[in-house]
């Protein structure tokens, strides 16, 4: 028996047997740490050790943090300064950001005491101390190994930001004071890569939103976005709600705003006389502009924007049940129940015909000279060879006869045929093999394909019968990859789109930026636009700079709408963050100061869809020494930008003479230090704008030491973070530039 996530098992009574204690720990498994198989561990020499501090001064160190083996990596995790009243878990978890529980995690309740996927550390004397948990050492210390992998138990660190963390155990699940996080990256991931950390939705999440409703085309039955004229053609019937207007016919709309460009309401009937006629199905586009379409009951017409009436022919036989472009520009394929014919559009003469055992609906793949004919009643899918006009194969529809008719469409890129049956979509490859079944909560009604992006769009309609618990009157739009059938966008609810008044249809703009969906019951066409949460395309990594050097951090992201950026800084090891005032450009430049050593920086990108942050980088600032520093830093201090003011103008130092930063804005100018001599600048101590910084002078080529840093807008206020040095090639490759010495730069450290 396991507890519900977030529900702590009861405290075990004293004197329990080990077996009882292990059984109690089984209930702890609900802490969302699920175990993974343990294989051969690799050595922990990948990457660089990192240290972070917690909100109560805890210090956490991980032996390896980058280039980890995705299959399995053993890392050493050490801690000190943890309280002796709260137990913690040590594990690899999804990093959900500040003050949010790290979860889900790899690892679990160790029922044998042999697994090291996660570790449980408890105060000395805790009832769980022993085989299942180890006790803190003196001063709240611990030293453990855990074996982590990039993927497992629903967590994929290639898709989300992951960190090795400590967090309070199940008995204090809401306690965030024990959260200390150190980001890690597996082989193939560079620090800051992977698209960044999505805060509310994963980085690069694709979704669609309603941008407009068009109600200018009566009761919409079918759609086509013309590839040449870019006009939106709508086959429509009359909408009973507008009794004063009969909207039947072919409507041509401006796809930007839904304005009516043209309305062709009449077409030739059985006698050749023009009459008001609905446009039931659109077969395909005409060159330049216009479409071929079917109008009830047996009409085949064509029209373009600006025409007063359609031209067309009236066929003999039964009602047309489907229509598609023919094998030549002058022909059209027509289904009249189980009879398939190719006819001449100008005369209505059938050039060839074929009668199948049954069926009403088809989809043509003229590139592969194939046509797929669906018999929903018999549960069969027939393949017709368009070259010979004969049946070349028959295939069973899973579920057997009597499935609710939905749609039959072919993917022009792959030749696959997609068949909507009831609440499922069956995907057959070009050879007729069933390769995928997609399940939905509503009725599958239409599909459209975007070959530019390799996406398939499916509209599902609610049944509309509220006496059925499965119905809620809301339809759904789904998007899939046509190669792997993976979900390619968040599902979008279509309120009010149900099938009681007709089937919905789709049209997709090439590239998928815009999608049009009809709702016959509501008499509208909804324009949907694609939006993408920010995805980081360039991110800075850890870097080292000398005191007084100019540092440039660069981050970029893509998204729709275009995201904005702001830079943030943490002075306490990424436990808390604050915005850098005025830093809203992709590049952040400033002059490095020793007070910034250990600061962490990140860029946060936002748009209407979500927020994504780059991985945090650590800035290491080393003191300037020797001739490198002579005359480099000077000028007036700026306490609003720095917790440490700069030295006076013109300070210089010769070979081996260390230039120290003065603690005030006044002092001697033109101070010099000879080789190996002692140099001072600006006095040994001083204050600037309430910063309270005090810096001593350099001695015998040494460096000044900052005694305190109490002011400045972003002065150090928390515990220090261990500095990390990164190779120059890695810095430049990750989008970080450290360049020219700031010889006259007056801005202080951020």
Image (cartoon, rainbow, N blue to C red):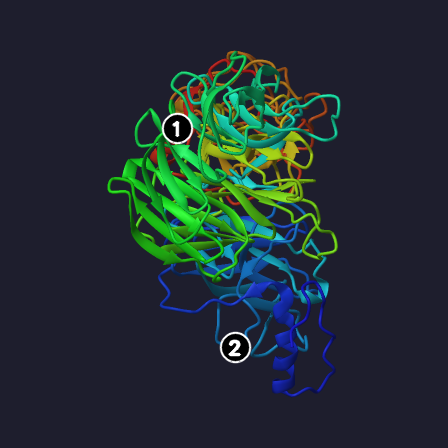
The reply to whether residue 573 is visible in this rendering is no
Nearer the observer, 629 or 38: 38
Query: Dot 2 surroundings within 10 Å: few (below 14), some, or many (20 or more)?
Result: few
Q: Is residue 292 left or right of residue 430?
A: right
Rendered position, 337 above or below 294? below
For residue 261, which quarter of the picture?
top right
Q: Is residue 306 left or right of residue 657?
A: right
Nearer the observer, 360 or 688: 360
Q: Which residue is mark 2?
A: 113
The reply to whether residue 535 is visible in this rendering is yes
* Residue at the image position 38 percent from the left and 24 percent from the top: 347
- Which is closer to the viewer, label 1 or label 2? 1
User: In the image, residue 711 lies at what x, y percent?
Assistant: 69, 29
Mark 1 or mark 2: name the one nearer the start of the chain.
2
User: In the image, residue 548 lies at what x, y percent?
Assistant: 49, 23
Rendered position, 35 above or below 505? below
> Residue at the left extreme?
388
SS type, badge 1: loop
User: In the image, residue 593 lies at what x, y percent?
Assistant: 54, 28
Q: Which residue is mark 1?
A: 348
Q: Which numbered dot is residue 547? A: none
Q: How many marks?
A: 2
For residue 93, which quarter of the picture?
bottom right
* Residue at the image position 70 percent from the left and 63 percent from the top: 6
Q: CA distance from mark 1 to mark 2?
A: 81 Å
Query: Dot 1 surroundings within 10 Å: few (below 14), some, or many (20 or more)?
Result: some
Q: Please identify the quadrant where the N terminus is shown.
A: bottom right
């Amino acid at each position: 028996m396991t507890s519900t996530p977030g529900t702590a098992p009861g405290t075990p009574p004293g004197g329990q047997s080990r077996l009882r204690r292990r059984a109690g720990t089984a209930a702890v498994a609900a802490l969302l740490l699920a175990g993974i198989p343990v294989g051969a561990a690799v050595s922990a020499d990948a990457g660089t050790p990192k240290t972070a501090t917690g909100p109560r001064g805890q210090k956490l160190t991980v032996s390896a943090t980058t280039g980890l083996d995705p299959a399995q990596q053993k890392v050493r995790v050490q801690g000190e300064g943890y309280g002796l009243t709260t137990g913690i878990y040590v594990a690899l978890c999804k990093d959900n950001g500040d003050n949010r529980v790290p979860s889900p995690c790899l690892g679990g309740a160790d029922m044998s005491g042999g697994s090291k996927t996660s570790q449980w550390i408890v105060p000395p004397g805790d009832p769980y101390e022993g085989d299942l948990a180890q006790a803190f050492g003196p001063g709240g210390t611990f030293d453990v190994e855990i074996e982590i992998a990039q993927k497992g138990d629903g967590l994929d660190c290639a898709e989300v930001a992951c960190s090795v963390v400590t967090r309070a155990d199940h008995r204090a699940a809401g306690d965030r004071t024990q959260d200390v996080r150190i980001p890690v990256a597996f082989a193939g991931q560079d620090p800051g890569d992977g698209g960044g950390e999505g805060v509310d939705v994963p980085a690069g999440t694709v979704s669609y939103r309603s941008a407009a409703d068009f109600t200018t085309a009566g009761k919409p039955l079918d759609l086509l976005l013309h590839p040449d004229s870019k006009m939106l053609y709508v086959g429509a019937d009359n909408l009973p709600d507008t009794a004063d207007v009969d909207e039947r016919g072919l409507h041509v709309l401006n796809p930007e705003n839904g304005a009516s460009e043209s309305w062709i309401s009449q077409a030739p009937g059985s006698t050749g006389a023009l009459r008001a006629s609905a446009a039931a199905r659109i077969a395909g586009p005409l060159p330049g502009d216009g479409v071929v379409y079917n109008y009830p009951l047996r009409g085949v017409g064509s029209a373009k924007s600006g025409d007063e009436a359609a031209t067309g022919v009236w066929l003999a036989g039964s009602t047309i049940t489907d229509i598609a472009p023919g094998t030549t520009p002058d022909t059209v394929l027509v289904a009249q129940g189980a009879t398939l014919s190719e006819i001449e559009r100008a005369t209505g003469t059938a050039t060839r015909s074929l009668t199948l055992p049954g069926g009403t609906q088809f989809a043509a793949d003229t590139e592969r000279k194939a046509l797929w004919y669906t018999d929903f009643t018999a549960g069969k899918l027939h393949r017709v060879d368009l070259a010979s006009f004969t049946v070349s194969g028959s295939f069973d529809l899973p579920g057997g006869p009597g499935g609710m008719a939905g749609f039959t469409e072919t993917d022009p890129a792959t030749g696959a045929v997609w068949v909507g049956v009831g609440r499922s979509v069956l995907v057959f490859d070009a050879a007729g093999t069933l390769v995928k079944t997609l399940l939905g909560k509503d009725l599958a009604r239409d599909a459209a394909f975007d070959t530019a992006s390799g996406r398939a769009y499916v509209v599902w309609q609610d049944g509309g019968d509220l006496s059925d618990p499965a119905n809620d009157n809301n339809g759904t739009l789904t998007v899939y990859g046509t190669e792997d059938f993976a979900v390619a966008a968040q599902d979008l609810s279509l309120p009010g789109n149900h099938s009681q008044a007709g089937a919905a249809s789709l049209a997709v703009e090439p590239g998928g930026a815009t999608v049009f969906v009809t709702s016959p019951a509501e008499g509208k066409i909804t324009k949907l636009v694609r939006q993408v949460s920010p995805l980081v395309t360039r991110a800075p990594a850890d870097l080292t700079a000398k005191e007084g050097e100019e540092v440039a951090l660069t981050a970029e992201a893509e998204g729709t709408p275009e995201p904005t950026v702001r830079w943030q800084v943490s002075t306490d090891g990424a436990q808390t963050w604050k915005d850098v005032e005025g830093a809203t450009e992709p590049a952040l430049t400033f002059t490095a100061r020793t007070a910034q050593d250990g600061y962490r920086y990140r860029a946060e990108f936002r748009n209407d869809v979500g927020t994504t942050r780059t991985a945090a980088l650590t800035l290491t600032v080393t003191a300037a020494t020797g001739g490198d520093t002579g005359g480099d830093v000077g000028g007036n201090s700026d306490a609003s930008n720095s917790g440490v003011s700069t030295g006076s103008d013109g300070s210089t130092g010769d070979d081996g003479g260390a230039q120290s930063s003065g603690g005030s804005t006044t002092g001697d100018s033109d101070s010099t230090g000879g080789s190996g001599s002692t140099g001072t600048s600006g006095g040994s101590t001083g204050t600037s704008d309430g910063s309270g910084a005090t810096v001593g002078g350099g001695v015998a080529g040494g460096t000044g030491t900052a005694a305190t840093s109490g002011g400045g807008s972003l002065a150090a206020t928390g515990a220090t973070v261990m500095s990390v040095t990164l190779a120059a090639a890695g810095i430049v490759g990750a989008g970080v530039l450290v360049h020219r010495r700031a010889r006259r730069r007056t801005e202080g450290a951020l």
